[in-house]
Amino acid sequence: RFTSNAFHKKVVALMGPTRPEKTGPYWNACIVREPVSCSPCLKRECPRGEKGMECMKRITPGKVLKILEKEGLSCERVS
């Protein structure tokens, strides 16, 4: 995120357990979040164990691609 800001590039940030206003990105960003009752918990590991991480699991590749298209951004596939 810091490199993109230095080059004035827009960031698409996937936020699960984190809080954008606390952890950034702070400017020129499109935040992708899905509402979950326990988020943001700000924990590195989900207290719900293997059944947890709904905050990230609900952010599908299709949703991210739609946002990229809406923002006029493209992505390259890296192999």
Image (cartoon, rainbow, N blue to C red):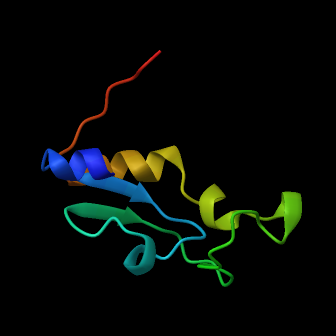
Q: Answer yes or no: is residue 28 visible.
A: yes
In the figure, is residue 63 to the left or right of 40? left
The tally of labels here is: 0
Q: Position of residue 20 (x, y in %)?
A: 41, 74
Q: Image check: 42 left or right of 28?
A: right
Q: Which residue is drawn at 34% across and 50% down?
A: 66
Q: Quadrant of residue 16?
A: bottom right
- Residue 54 location in percent, x, y? 69, 65
The residue positioned farthest toward the bottom in the image shown: 37
Q: Quadrant of residue 22?
A: bottom left
The correct choice, above or below, for 76 with respect to 22 in the image is above
Which residue is rendered at x = 59% and y = 79% of the image? Answer: 40
Residue located at (66% from left, 84% from top):
37
Residue 19 in picture, x, y percent from top left: 48, 76
The residue at the point 24 percent across, 36 percent down is 74
Q: Which residue lies furthest to the top in this view?
A: 79
Viewer-nearest residue: 3 or 56: 3
Q: Is residue 75 above or below residue 64?
A: above
Please provide percent x and percent y for residue 39: 62, 78
In the rendered structure, the answer to whether residue 63 lies left or right of residue 54 reads left
Give the side of residue 79 with respect to residue 68, left or right. Answer: right
Q: Which residue lies furthest to the left in this view?
A: 8
Residue sitting nearer the eye, 54 or 4: 4
**Residue 9 visible in the displayed image:** no
Nearer to me, 18 or 54: 18
